Image: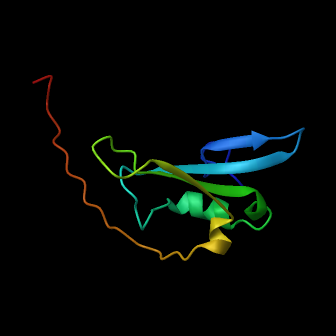
């Protein structure tokens, strides 16, 4: 159920043959209270046979100008089952200019 071209996670960890972890890594310059996942990432995280292996790693406070905030790495197993998620839809308008470069 996972696409080979767009699997919905960043890293695949294998231990002695079988899948150990499917890791989605998100980073933020600050200590973010909300983190977005793509719809594809969320589908992979929610797939029943992958849930025990799916991990969300959050790296935060990565900005060097934060004086009293130490960088951190937080690992969350089964984010689909352990975090509250709200679906957010964004409609996007894309503008472009086509240039007639041969005229």
Front in this rendered view, residue 72 or 34: 72
Task: Identify the residue at horizontal 30%, vertical 48% (top origin).
Answer: 67
Front in this rendered view, residue 8 or 20: 20
Quadrant for the N terminus in the image: bottom right
Residue 69 falls left or right of residue 41 = left
Task: Identify the residue at horizontal 63%, vertical 66% (top origin).
Answer: 79
Question: Farthest residue in the left direction?
Answer: 103
Count of number-bearing discs = 0
Task: Identify the residue at horizontal 70%, vertical 57% (top origin).
Answer: 54
Image quadrant assignment for residue 88: bottom left
Residue 32 falls left or right of residue 83 = left
Query: Is residue 47 positioned above or below 21 on the image?
Result: below
Q: How far from the left and from the top, in percent, is residue 8?
A: 60, 52
Quadrant for the C terminus in the image: top left
Query: Is residue 85 positioned above or below 50 on the image?
Result: below
Front in this rendered view, residue 67 or 62: 67
Q: How far from the left and from the top, in percent, is residue 29?
A: 36, 49
Question: Farthest residue in the right direction?
Answer: 16
Q: How far from the left and from the top, in percent, is residue 38?
A: 50, 59
Task: Identify the residue at horizontal 14%, vertical 31% (top origin).
Answer: 100
Image quadrant assignment for residue 98: top left
Query: How is the rendered protein coloured?
Result: rainbow
Question: Farthest residue in the front direction?
Answer: 68
Q: How far from the left and from the top, in percent, is residue 2?
A: 70, 53
């Amino acid at each position: 159920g996972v696409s080979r071209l767009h699997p919905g996670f960043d890293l695949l960890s294998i231990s002695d043959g079988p899948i150990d972890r499917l890791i989605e890594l998100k980073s933020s310059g600050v200590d973010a209270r909300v983190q977005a996942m793509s719809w594809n990432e969320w589908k992979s995280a929610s797939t029943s046979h992958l849930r025990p292996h799916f991990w969300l790693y959050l790296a935060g406070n990565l900005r060097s100008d934060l004086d009293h905030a130490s960088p951190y790495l937080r690992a969350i197993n089964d984010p689909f089952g352990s975090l509250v998620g709200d679906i957010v839809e964004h409609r996007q308008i894309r503008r472009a200019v086509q240039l007639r470069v041969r005229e």
